[in-house]
Amino acid sequence: MPSHDRFLALCAVLLLSGCGAAQPAPVPAASSTPAVHESGPAPATPIPESASAPAGIPGATRTGARPPVVQHGPRDTPWVSLTFDADMTDAMAERLRSGKVSSYANVTLLKMLEQRRIPATFFVTGQWAEEYPKITRRIAGNDLFEIANHSYEHAAFTADCYTLPQLPPATMTEDVAKTFTTLQPYGGRQTRYFRFPGLCHDKPALKALAPLGLTVVDGDVVSGDPFAQGPAPIVRAVLSQVKPGSIIVMHVTEANAQYTDDALPKILAGLQRRGLRPVKLSELLG
């Protein structure tokens, strides 16, 4: 997948710590419709409780096409979407158990979004939800927020995705389906959006996810919050890239992104100065 060179070294450092995202493909020219880089169905919307599904995959639909890949929403609307990845790898879980890390859940950030009534979309790994069930339930119970899928154990879906361990191709579909199943009992506003770990994907990976009836969401604004040494670089990264329709990638994993809550007030102020309003991802793309 194409990437900007200036993020490669940074992301490599990030992923050595157990969490990360590669810079997405270059943003295409301004458009009045969401940018979709693979053929497939329209952008996903939350699945109603009455939706039919193949056995074992809640809300899924059968399709032979590869899922669409979305980089941003319409450029002719003054909306942006704040998305927060909730990563959890086996290595991160081990650091929690050993006491080397106290938390991978930024409750301060969550409280700020709640108090300011800022809509957001959380891309949650299955292992993070299992580690933090109360916080996942808190997110799901707030109408401001919606939940999306970020894989089960944050492993790589391509052979060369920095230092992430690779999922065997035969288990890719199962990994993502397992995450939908893990998240379903939390209720709330759940979607069929999916974000690859590291934003790393190729045609075989997309084909593996075709049976799940999902939409892949990358993002055109990567905040760099996990490897930032303070809030200022995060603010600069977001406000220097953001445009109408942008999908902003940040993290709620406190120990791996400890300055995100400090950066958020200035990011929100900068968006307001530009006349940009945060909305849930489903609203931006819907």
Image (cartoon, rainbow, N blue to C red):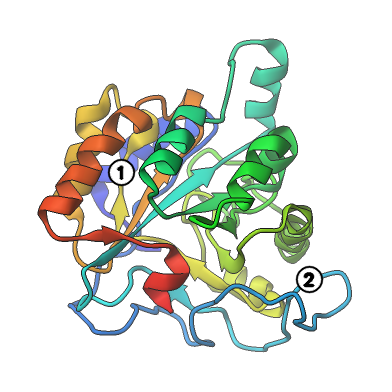
Q: At 41% across and 24% down in the image, what residue appears? A: 258
Q: Is residue 119 left or right of residue 145?
A: left
Q: Is residue 94 left or right of residue 233?
A: right
How many circles with numbers are drawn on the protein? 2
Residue lying farthest to the right in this orientation: 55
Decide: few, some or many residues near mark 1? Use Cα within 10 Å; few <14, some 14-19, many ≥20. many
Residue annotated with mark 1:
223
Q: At 75% across and 82% down in the image, what residue appears? A: 51
- Percent position of residue 77, x then y: 23, 75
- Percent position of residue 257, x then y: 42, 30
Q: Which mark is residue 158?
A: none
Could you tell me the amino acid type at mark 2?
Answer: Pro
Q: Is residue 190 left or right of residue 273?
A: right
Residue 26 in sight here? no
- Percent position of residue 216, x then y: 51, 69
Could you tell me the amino acid type at mark 1?
Answer: Ser
Q: Is residue 88 left or right of residue 160?
A: right
Residue 251 in sight here? yes
Residue annotated with mark 2:
58
